[in-house]
Image (tube, rainbow, N blue to C red):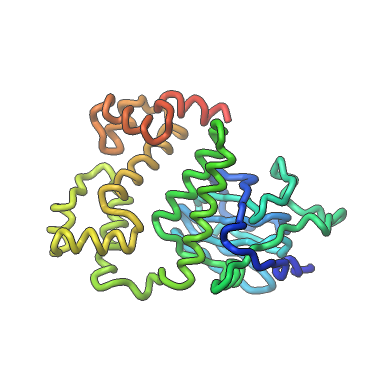
């Protein structure tokens, strides 16, 4: 199978990058192998829960929970879900708003009728390696939050959603490029491993009390220093991080359960339904009830 799409690159200054999103969804996939395929555009596949693997060029790449796979245009690959109840974020895009893609079938190459001129071109910035040079990434929590926001914008299709998706994708691609040089989980700041443990605990129980004084006490750190180290690793302060986790869980519960709005708010740490509704509307621009209705329609 021809993998020449991997070399379909072009040096482009950052100021000229203009990514367009073709598909963005939360995905649940059954355990087992998927069919091999090539795509015309590029894909970011983030593992929210479980484990997966992909074969590219005869090489197996394992993707653990919390990792992201960058799939280049035109490259034959075969994915396999390695655990039950696996969950993913899938985002398809191009770098220069150059592809005419309107549906999921448009993204997948029909090998019996390949459109050779349709493959997307990867933009490469000066001083950075191509993103396709490293297929597996460990995105920062901020990067994951941005990917979730892309899914939300693409699903809701609110006015100007294409522009917002473009802006979010620019940030995501920038953070992935930055991680080539700076973000390395095996080379964390002093006490960074303890911060990661706290972040995992926050993710498992976002509704708990995670005030800065409590966190500083748990970590036996000066509060200001704790906030500084936390922000360096998470990309945001602790309060903003836990709010992001709570909001993410609230969106999931509204999409996937029949819990009342009040029950959702209490479950994620906001027992006052009016306060929860105000926070949700401030972030999403719509009420929790409207979010649930739109997400189920779309």
Estimate the x, y position of residue 45 in percent, counting from the top left. 56, 55
Estimate the x, y position of residue 291 in percent, counting from the top left. 46, 29
Estimate the x, y position of residue 167 in percent, counting from the top left. 52, 48
Residue 232 vs residue 153: left or right? left
User: Closer to the camera, 198 or 93?
Assistant: 93
Residue 102 appears in which quarter of the rendering?
Answer: top right
Q: How many marks?
A: 0
Residue 242 vs residue 224: left or right? right
Residue 71 appears in which quarter of the rendering?
Answer: bottom right
What's the residue at 71%, 64% (across, down)? Answer: 75
Quarter of the figure that contains the C terminus: top right
What's the residue at 45%, 73% (across, down)? Answer: 181
Task: Say if residue 99 shows up in the picture.
Answer: yes
Residue lying at the far right of the rendered structure: 113
What's the residue at 73%, 62% (across, down)? Answer: 74
User: Closer to the camera, 217 or 96?
Assistant: 96
Residue 97 vs residue 51: left or right? right
Task: Say if residue 85 shows up in the picture.
Answer: no
What's the residue at 46%, 34% (across, down)? Answer: 256
Quarter of the figure that contains the N terminus: bottom right
Residue 259 appears in which quarter of the rendering?
Answer: top left
User: Closer to the camera, 100 or 16?
Assistant: 16
Q: Is residue 219 above or below residue 24?
A: below
Residue 252 vs residue 34: left or right? left
Estimate the x, y position of residue 223 in percent, counting from the top left. 15, 59
């Amino acid at each position: 199978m021809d993998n020449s799409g991997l070399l379909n690159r072009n040096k482009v200054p950052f100021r000229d990058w203009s990514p367009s999103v073709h598909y963005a969804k939360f995905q649940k996939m059954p355990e087992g192998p998927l069919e091999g395929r090539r795509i015309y555009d590029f894909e970011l596949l983030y593992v929210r829960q479980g484990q997966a693997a992909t074969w590219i060029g005869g090489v197996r790449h394992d993707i653990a929970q919390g990792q992201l796979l960058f799939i280049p245009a035109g490259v034959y690959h075969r994915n396999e879900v390695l655990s039950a109840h696996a969950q993913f974020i899938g985002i398809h895009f191009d770098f220069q708003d150059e592809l005419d893609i309107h549906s999921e079938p448009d993204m997948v190459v029909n090998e019996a009728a390949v459109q050779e001129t349709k493959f997307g071109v990867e933009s490469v910035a000066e001083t950075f390696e191509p993103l396709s040079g490293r297929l597996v990434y460990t995105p920062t929590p901020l990067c994951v939050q941005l990917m979730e926001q892309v899914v939300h914008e693409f699903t809701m299709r609110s006015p100007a959603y294409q522009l917002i998706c473009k802006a979010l994708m620019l940030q995501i691609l920038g953070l992935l490029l930055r991680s080539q040089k700076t973000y390395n989980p095996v080379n964390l700041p002093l006490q960074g491993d303890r911060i990661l443990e706290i972040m995992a605990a926050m993710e498992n129980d976002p509704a708990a009390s995670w005030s800065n004084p409590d966190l500083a006490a748990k970590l036996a750190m000066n509060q200001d220093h704790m906030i500084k180290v936390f922000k360096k690793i998470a990309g945001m302060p602790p309060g903003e991080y836990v709010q992001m986790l709570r909001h993410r869980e609230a969106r999931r519960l509204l999409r996937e359960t029949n819990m009342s709005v009040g029950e959702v708010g209490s479950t994620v740490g906001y027992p006052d339904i009016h306060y929860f509704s105000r926070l949700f509307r401030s972030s999403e621009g719509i009420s929790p009830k409207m979010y649930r209705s739109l997400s189920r329609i779309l």
